[in-house]
Amino acid sequence: MTALDLALVFMLVAAAVSILTESLRVPYTTALVVAGLVIGNMHLAPPVPVTPEVLLTLLIPPLLFEGGLRLPPRHLRTYWGVIALLAVPGTVLTAVAVGAAAVAVFHLDWRSAVVLGSIIAATDPVSVQVLLREAGLGLRLGTVLDGEAVLNDGVAIILFMILGARTAVEPAGAVVRFLWLLCGGIAVGALVALATAYAMGRTRRPLVEALGSLIAALGALLAAGAVGASGVIAVVTAGVVFASQGIRHITDIGRETVSVIWDMIAFLANSILFLVIGLEVPAALLARYWTLIAVVVVAALAARWLIVYGAVAVGQTQTRLLPNAWRPVLVWGGLRGGVAIALALSVDAGFPGRDEIVAAAFGLVVFTLLVQALSVPYVMRRAGVLPAAHSRDA
């Protein structure tokens, strides 16, 4: 099967699943994962070679930029404190909590356990963004959940890069590298987006304006890599800055063109990513390590509960606009997805406990996409967060 054949098959499956889910009223991403699981584990198609580089370079960065582009600047400014608490210390604490549980119950060595924790610590922005659209979450609550997912994705990747390195890094060196990857990525992404926005203010051609958004995304990724900063953080920052500074300088038709282009990019990347997740999950591996998967699921949910309730409690001192009804939705809406799969596949073959790490990461992703994603509407109803809030929050 050639690359063109494979591309056509992916598009046909994505279109068929999308049409089917419209009538069945099930989440599109969940249906794609199920389709991938069936196709992959029943060997209905030749194996699809997927490398971590493809996921982390071609699929996830465009989705992160699109996510940053969609974040409402007004709500982002209001809830930035809570988002930062959830995304940075929250991600680190989740990695430690999951790692400690894996050591205590399954007796993994500490390094392997913390690497596992870093892989699954962050909620996946792609999964969360689709959840926001399909579940009808309000804009204010959606901004907190989506903003956290977009930012903590980069934090988890940075942790994984440091902890999963072939040679151990000294604590002081790890802290310095973490800060540079994070802060350097923010600075690079902001500068690239501001420069692009300035240049786009000199043209009135919609297609050139839309091209500017593509330049901002790719330029941030490449510029961050050139200076050794986090490309993921740079792309996220570029999306947020371009949304607040670049969009207002372009024409109305240019804004519509940017929206249409990124909607199409997001749809194609989402479709490929979630289908690949299903294709890459080996059912036999999950069955072999089901006890570890259960431990990781419980530990991840417990850590998520503690961090969300703690961050929201602290955030109440910053703003009174954080209803208690949001808390269970924030806990249950912390989905994992393509980032965890990509990082798990990136673990070196000789790394201690690699099979356990891969199995636990895949198992948690399947649980969040097939159990949590499907039950979020129920949690919303029980919490009193109804889809009708979307119109009130806008």
Image (cartoon, grey):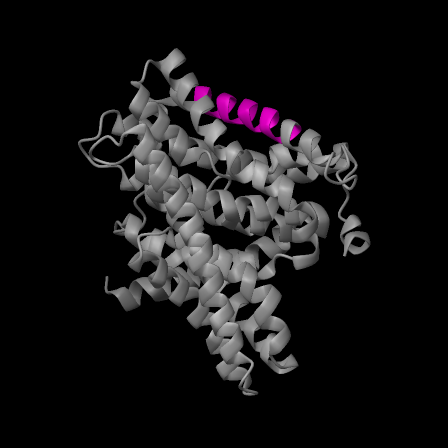
Q: Quadrant of residue 162?
A: top left
Which x, y percent locates residue 375?
63, 36
What secondary structure is the magenta-colored segment mainly? helix
Against 84, residue 209 (above or below) is below
Residue 72 rendering spot, x and y as whole percentages: 66, 58
The residue range painted magenta reads 294-309
Residue 131 in view (yes/no)? yes
Q: Does residue 197 belong to the magenta stretch?
A: no
Q: Quadrant of the N terminus?
A: bottom left
From this viewpoint, which residue is outermost toward the left? 350
Q: Quadrant of residue 170?
A: top left
Q: At 35% from the left edge and 52% from the top edge, which residue is drawn?
A: 229
Q: Give how far across and how far down residue 37 sits, in percent.
A: 40, 42
Residue 129 in the image: state x and y as whole percent: 57, 51
381 horizontally vs 148: left or right: right
Q: Is residue 279 above or below residue 62?
A: above
**Front residue (pair 357, 3):** 357
Q: Is residue 214 above or below residue 132?
A: below
Camera-side residue: 40 or 369?
369
Which of the pair 315/118 is nearer the observer?
Answer: 315
